[in-house]
Image (cartoon, rainbow, N blue to C red):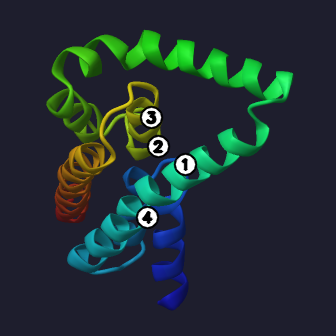
Amino acid sequence: MYYIILLTFALSISPLGEARVGIPYGIINGLNPILALMIGLIGNLLIFPVFMYLIDTFNAKFWRYKFYKKQNIKLIRRAKKGVGANIQKYGFWGLMIFVMIPLPTTGAYIGTIAAYIFKLERREAFIAISLGVIVSCIIMAVSTHFSLLGISLF
């Protein structure tokens, strides 16, 4: 049981799928849906402060190196191309909706990068990403739970 809880948390904080993978994993492996939701939510909410700290730290230490700077600029261009218009146009709400949609490449990690790139105020970005994560986690928990109920009927 503790192993499932730990793995649900680890999957929820990892960039490989965030809570979109962690919550279904927990529910499918027998965790109470509310417990899986809470664990996944906590893991996913920790992404913004930890990742923003890492971005600041790495940029301060490695920006002077050509390879690091070149890779960052490439990432920034790609992010601006993918999400830039909506986040620049709608700001807080655009970021929240972007993070809220439970699809690949639309989570807290990319939302944090977008908030950094577009220089959104940290507090505002944290609230937008947190609200998006909460809605996304609820969608994943409810859909996984009811999917399993539907499967068990057959």
Picture layout, residue 153 above or below residue 101: below
Q: Nearer the viewer, residue 117 or 109?
A: 117
Q: Which residue is mark 4?
A: 25
Q: Nearer the viewer, mark 2 or mark 1?
A: 2
Work out how far the residue at label 4 is from the one at label 3, CA to CA, in angstroms: 30 Å
Residue assigned mark 2: 109
Q: Earlier in the sequence, mark 2 or mark 4?
A: 4
N-terminal label among 2 and 1: 1
Identity of the residue furthest to the bottom in this view: 2
Residue at 19% in and 51% down? 131
Q: Which mark is residue 116?
A: 3
Mark 2 and mark 1: Cα distance apart in space: 7 Å
Q: Residues within 10 Å of mark 1 (few under 14, many from 20)?
A: some
Q: Amino acid at mark 3?
A: Tyr
Q: Are marks 2 and 1 in contact (CB under 8 Å)?
A: yes
Q: How many marks?
A: 4
Residue type at mark 1: give it.
Pro
Q: Are marks 3 and 1 in contact (CB under 8 Å)?
A: no
Q: Of the two numbered discs 4 and 3 on the same chain, state the one appearing first in sequence.
A: 4
Query: Which quadrant, please, contains the C terminus?
Result: bottom left
